[in-house]
Image: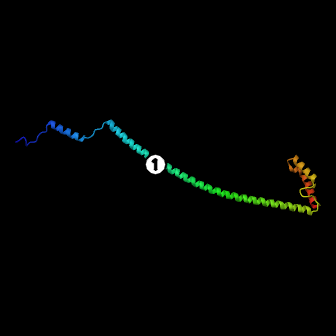
């Protein structure tokens, strides 16, 4: 048909390859990194991420540890305060108990003195007609016989005869007063 110029040109084999090379070069254009360098960058990145994660965990551990220490110190302070309150309470209770013991000792001593006075007065009013309470020669032989019997045996039933003798002597002495 006419002119060759109006017809479609067949691409030359050299030009199609050239275009493909240009296109692939465009797709792969940029900075090329060696595989070793790429691995190093990847490891550094992973190392950085791991390092940040590790530091974050360490911070969290330290924060939790500091909070636990603070709680423990607070509990210790509370317990120390309670201990001081109990010490004060115990000191007061002991002081009260000591006061009561001193009061009872004084009362006991007063009653002992009063009782001794009453006993001596009773002994003096009896005009010496009977044995003095706790002293004297009343029923000495009966007491000695009973004591000897009780020393010799573990069964006090064997000493009933001596007990009866002492009881009879005692009644006789008291009635004669």
* Chosen colour scheme: rainbow
Circle 1 Cα neighbour tier, 10 Å, few/some/many (<14 / 14–19 / ≥20): few
Looking at the rendered structure, the secondary structure element under dot 1 is helix
Q: Is residue 108 left or right of residue 174?
A: left
Q: Is residue 110 left or right of residue 148?
A: left
Residue at 52 percent across and 52 percent down: it is: 70
| Picture quarter with the C terminus | bottom right
Front position in the image: 169 or 34: 34
Residue farthest toward the bottom in the current orientation of the protein: 125
Residue farthest toward the left in the current orientation of the protein: 2
The image quarter containing residue 108 is bottom right
Image coordinates of residue 27 in percent, x first then y, are: 24, 41
Give the residue pinned by disc 1: 60
Front position in the image: 118 or 164: 118
Q: Is residue 85 left or right of residue 1?
A: right
Image coordinates of residue 158 in percent, x first then y, are: 88, 49
Front position in the image: 106 or 155: 106
| Picture quarter with the N terminus | top left
Image coordinates of residue 92 in percent, x first then y, are: 67, 59
Image coordinates of residue 77 in percent, x first then y, are: 57, 54
Residue at 32 percent across and 36 percent down: it is: 35
The count of marks equals 1
The image quarter containing residue 112 is bottom right
Relative vertical location of residue 20 with respect to residue 89 in this rendering, above or below: above
Residue at 89 percent across and 62 percent down: it is: 121
């Amino acid at each position: 048909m006419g002119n060759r110029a109006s017809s479609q040109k067949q691409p030359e084999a050299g030009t199609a390859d050239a275009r493909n090379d240009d296109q692939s070069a465009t797709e792969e254009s940029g900075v090329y990194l060696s595989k070793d360098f790429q691995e190093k960058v990847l490891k550094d990145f992973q190392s950085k991420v791991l390092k940040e994660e590790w530091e974050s965990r360490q911070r969290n551990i330290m924060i939790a540890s500091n909070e636990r220490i603070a709680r423990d110190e607070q509990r210790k302070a509370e317990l120390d305060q309670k201990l001081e309150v109990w010490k004060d309470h115990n000191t007061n209770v002991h002081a009260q108990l000591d006061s009561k013991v001193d009061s009872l000792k004084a009362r006991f001593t007063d009653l002992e003195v009063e009782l001794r006075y009453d006993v001596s007065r009773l002994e003096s009013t009896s005009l010496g007609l009977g044995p003095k309470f706790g002293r004297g020669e009343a029923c000495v032989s009966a007491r000695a016989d009973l004591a000897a019997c009780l020393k010799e045996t573990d069964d006090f039933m064997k000493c009933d005869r001596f007990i009866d003798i002492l009881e009879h002597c005692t009644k006789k002495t008291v009635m004669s007063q």
